[in-house]
Amino acid sequence: MSPILEIADLKRLAKRRVPKLFFDYADSGAYTESTYRANESDFYRIKLRQRVLVDMSGRSLETTMIGEKVKMPVALAPTGLTGMQHADGEMLAARAAEEFGVPFTLSTMSICSIEDVASVTTKPFWFQLYVMRDRDFVLNLIERAKAAKCSALVLTADLQILGQRHKDIRNGLSAPPKLTPKHLFQMATRPRWCWNMLKTDKRTFRNIHGHAKSVTDLASLNAWTTEQFDPQLSWKDVAWIKERWGGKLIIKGILDVEDAKMAAETGADAIVVSNHGGRQLDGAHSSIAMLPRIVDAVGDRIEVHLDGGIRSGQDVLKAVALGAKGTFIGRPFLYGLGAMGKPGVTRALEIIAKEMDVTMALCGKRRIAEIDESIIAENPFKG
Ligand code: FNR
């Protein structure tokens, strides 16, 4: 096997090991995928400033996100169907994140449940909430997240309606997979994945199934969520959630200065500048392009985080330099999980940390607190 040196190596390996319909589910964006691509390519347009002959010894990537100590400013983003990249995926990723010392965020749309993840972790993780029309369901999730001692609620604001991903439709995506000849062929060529999947009893949406018994596969999940999307969802609901939750709140999916100001008004602890990894509004700006404007507008009032397109430690450093207190990665850890299970998630985190450390040194800095715009040589996305 060729060495795993960068996130792209994990992606290649995941493509070989995960059945096509689930690999494509991770590796897809909405419609033309222009925003998905821009999330990655816009990072290349920002240039770092090389400094030499400065003391680079005793470096550390440690910092805080919403007051929690982290080994580096990178959290695992909430991703639906993670347990289909690898059996027990959410539990494995949560363990890897805990051991590494970064936050793990469990999606409402996970395969493993809040309780499953709580049973294998010793430190608090974060829980991501989708606000559905059925407020009893929402309250039930909030209570379960509290009981599991989750230390933050990540409220996703950019999915009141589901963006269309062509690949999923073409692949006839379903979870658990339907045994059509095409899918059977895809499974048969991925024996390691099949074997692991057969060993686990966690193959349905356990957070949702606990409440909506009709949700047993992706088709019934789609029917349920389509019916459950609430077109009337508004900032008033955010206040309601905040009150019910009572703990730290992060609002995810902010891409506009006006929305960022509204979010800051709610008294949330942080926002995530995000376009859902290019999976929702195709044609929107990349997250990194919007970051400076949003930081300018609300950075003194609320912690600003970013996700979308981060594939290296250099990308994390650029986001931090432009004002992000922390970042989230989605696909990089999913590729690691699909490629190698838990060690693959650890590998993804190690790769990013190593790249970040070396890059920080070559920019002449030793601590995250020292990272600011002075390490940027050129930025086409100025606030
Ligand atoms: C997501 N994302 C997401 N976000 C969320 O709030 N709840 C969810 O259930 C999901 N599900 C999901 C599935 C998959 C396969 C992906 C790739 C993404 C969005 C995610 O949290 C994050 O915003 C992006 O993944 C960040 O972009 P990168 O790092 O994947 O480029």
Image (spheres, rainbow, N blue to C red):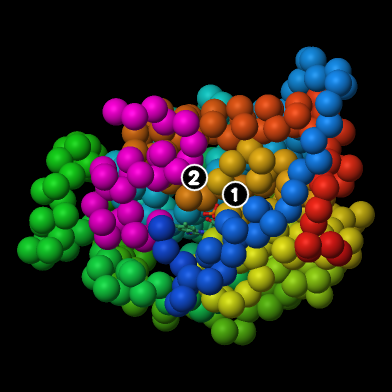
Q: Which residues are magenta?
A: 1-26
Identify the residue position indicated by label 1 in the image: 310
Residue 67 visible within the image: yes
State the residue lying farthest toward the bottom. 232
Q: Which residue: 15% across, 40% down?
A: 191
Q: Nearer the viewer, residue 44 or 291?
A: 44
Q: Is residue 279 above or below residue 4?
A: below
Indicate left or right for 221 with 159 as reference.
left
| Quadrant of the rendering where the N terminus is positioned | top left
In the rendered image, the vertical position of residue 331 relative to residue 342, given as above or below? below
Q: Are marks 1 and 2 in contact (CB under 8 Å)?
A: yes
At horizontal 49% and vertical 36% (from top left) the residue drawn is: 6
Name the residue tied to disc 2.
332
Say which residue appears at 15% left-offset and 51% top-offset: 187
Indicate if the residue with disc 1 has its beta carbon within 8 Å of ligand 1: yes
Q: Is residue 170 left or right of residue 66?
A: left
User: Quick check: is the Cβ at mark 2 less than 8 Å away from ligand 1?
Assistant: yes
Residue 126 position within the rendered picture, expressed as x and y whole percent measured from the top left: 59, 45
Total numbered circles? 2
The CA distance from mark 1 to mark 2 is 8 Å
Query: 366 left or right of 144?
Result: right
Q: Is residue 326 left or right of residue 192?
A: right
